[in-house]
Image (cartoon, grey):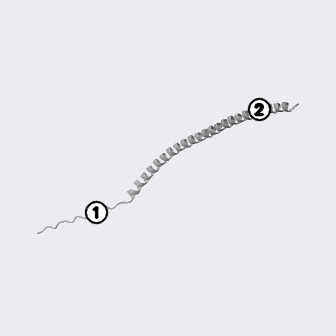
Amino acid sequence: MGFLNVAEILKILVSIITLLNFVGIIFVFIANRLSFTKIINNDLQHLSQDVKSIVIKQETLQKDVSNLSDAVAYMRGFFDAKMVSVYAKRKTGTVKKCKKEKV
């Protein structure tokens, strides 16, 4: 084997390595892109589900609080009405002076 044959074999070997390197780069790019989109979409789905559950819980809490505020208002009015009847308020006002008649 002469130098020309070795040079031809090295040219073929270098071209195969270059082609494999190019295919590997394309494969890594595609795998990176697919994994990135999968991770992003999966995280966004979990966040969307979490936000929906929080909104549902907030609506039920708001209904419970409004029912509780109605009950507290009723009780407050009931007890205020009883307290008012126990304590008598004095009427204060100005006393009218009577005119004296001249005789």
**Could you tell me how many numbered marks the image carries?**
2
Residue 30 picture location, percent across and down: 68, 34
Kind of residue at badge 2:
Ser
Q: Residue furthest bottom?
A: 103
Quarter the C terminus occupies: bottom left
Question: Element under label 1?
Answer: loop
Q: Is residue 1 above or below residue 76?
A: above
Label 2: how many Cα within 10 Å (few below 14, some 14–19, many 20+): few
Q: Which residue is mark 2?
A: 15
Of the pair 93 and 58, the residue shown nearer to us = 58
Residue 77 picture location, percent across and down: 42, 52
**Is residue 99 rendered to the left or right of residue 53?**
left
Quarter the N terminus occupies: top right
Residue 49 picture location, percent across and down: 59, 39
Label 1: how many Cα within 10 Å (few below 14, some 14–19, many 20+): few
Question: Element under label 2?
Answer: helix
Q: Residue at x 50, y 45 (%)?
A: 62
Identify the disc placed on residue 10.
none
Image quarter of residue 36: top right
- Marks 1 & 2, CB-CB < 8 Å contact: no
Kind of residue at badge 1:
Gly
Q: CA distance from mark 1 to mark 2?
A: 113 Å
Specify which label sits upstream in the sequence, 1 or 2.
2
Q: Residue furthest left?
A: 103
Q: Residue at x 60, y 39 (%)?
A: 44
Q: Which residue is mark 1?
A: 93
Q: Residue at x 56, y 42 (%)?
A: 51
User: Depth-wise, is mark 1 or mark 2 nearer the camera?
Assistant: 2
Of the pair 77 and 85, the residue shown nearer to us = 77
**Is residue 80 rendered to the left or right of residue 92?**
right
Residue 64 picture location, percent across and down: 51, 45
**Is residue 65 rendered to the left or right of residue 41?**
left
